[in-house]
Image (tube, rainbow, N blue to C red):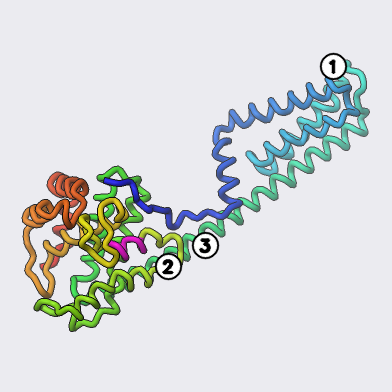
Amino acid sequence: MGANTGVRSPGQRVPTVSRALESIRGELDDPAMTVLAIASLTLLTFTAVRISGGAPSALMEIGYAPVALAAYAFGSRGGLVTGILVGAVLGPLPALLGFDRVEGPADWIIRVTAFAGIGTVIGGMLGRTAVDASDVHDRLLEIQDRERQSMLALATAAESRDTDAGEHVRRLEIAARKLAAHTGMSERHAAEVGIAAAFHDIGKLRVPERILLKPDALDPDEWTVIRLHPIWSEQALAGGEHLAVAREVARWHHENWDGSGYPDGLYGDRIPLSARIVRIVDAFDAMTNRRPYQQPVSFEAALEELQANAGNHFDPELVRHFVDMVRTDGELRSELTDLRSA
């Protein structure tokens, strides 16, 4: 089985500033380590200033480094307190220790005020930036969730024409997510595949009911229309990057492992993993639930049918995973049974 997952992360597009702040903040989660880093920078500044000749040295300005770090890690108060401490270390302390070339009291006051003021301002600015970035992030997630809910409503409307609609969408989401996780996919990526499964047939809205619900065999012209619905589904999901997995599932969920599927005749690992997963769970759901044109079969009979077609219609390794999962996961069987159409 190939590794072509095509999986991305919808709903996780954090703004650039927020990503940068979160990345740095992640390195400073331990307050003790942060305090140690601030103290080390302060000592380094003190040492550099003394080695370079004392107070007149330009290296005095290195003192802003621990002040800025404290402001970032602990906010305005951290910047204020550290500014005062660093100012004291670089001003009064050398005088008390008897070093030569030290600043006088007036310079001490100016330097402490500068360090403390800059620390307070930096802490306030970074705090506001983090809050603003978080607000933007939350707003983006809210917009994406509303878009997803709108698309889900359309998907349910599409499915309602030839299935039990809401229950069908829910069954597919559950089974696809669990199969993706069963193959080793991360929880987040598995959730994306589950969402994509719910949207996969949205293009059916453009298929006439006389074709979609026809109980007899379709003629060539009708088959031509049916074979277009994956393309229509992909087009309906055009737009945000967070729907990338949904688009690939929509277009390729009718591709077969042996290349006999549609619309593009992909085969084997050339079919995205997400689409191969939905191909299996959709077929299983179609067999085990009532449709206008067929009666349902038992779970076991459907699993045997999947096994019989592994290697031609379905990815054989995924079939093995799915059969094992359905036979051993009592919770999954219970969920699918509760949502099963009569």
Residue type at tag 1: Leu
Compute the Cα span from label 1 to label 2: 65 Å
Q: Residues within 10 Å of mark 1 (few under 14, many from 20)?
A: few
Which element is circle 3 on?
helix
Q: Position of residue 293 (x, y in %)?
A: 10, 74
Q: Residue at x 25, y 66 (%)?
A: 262
Q: Which mark is residue 97?
A: 1
Which element is circle 2 on?
helix
Q: Which mark is residue 146?
A: 2
Q: Which corner quadrant holds the C terminus?
A: bottom left
Highlighted range, magenta: 246-252
Asked if residue 182 shows in the view, the reply is: yes
Q: Of the residues under marks 3 and 2, which one precedes in the sequence? A: 3
Decide: is 175 above or below 224. above
Q: Do tag 1 and tag 3 residues touch (Cβ < 8 Å)? A: no
Q: Nearer the viewer, residue 335 or 306?
A: 306
Q: Nearer the viewer, residue 186 or 131?
A: 186
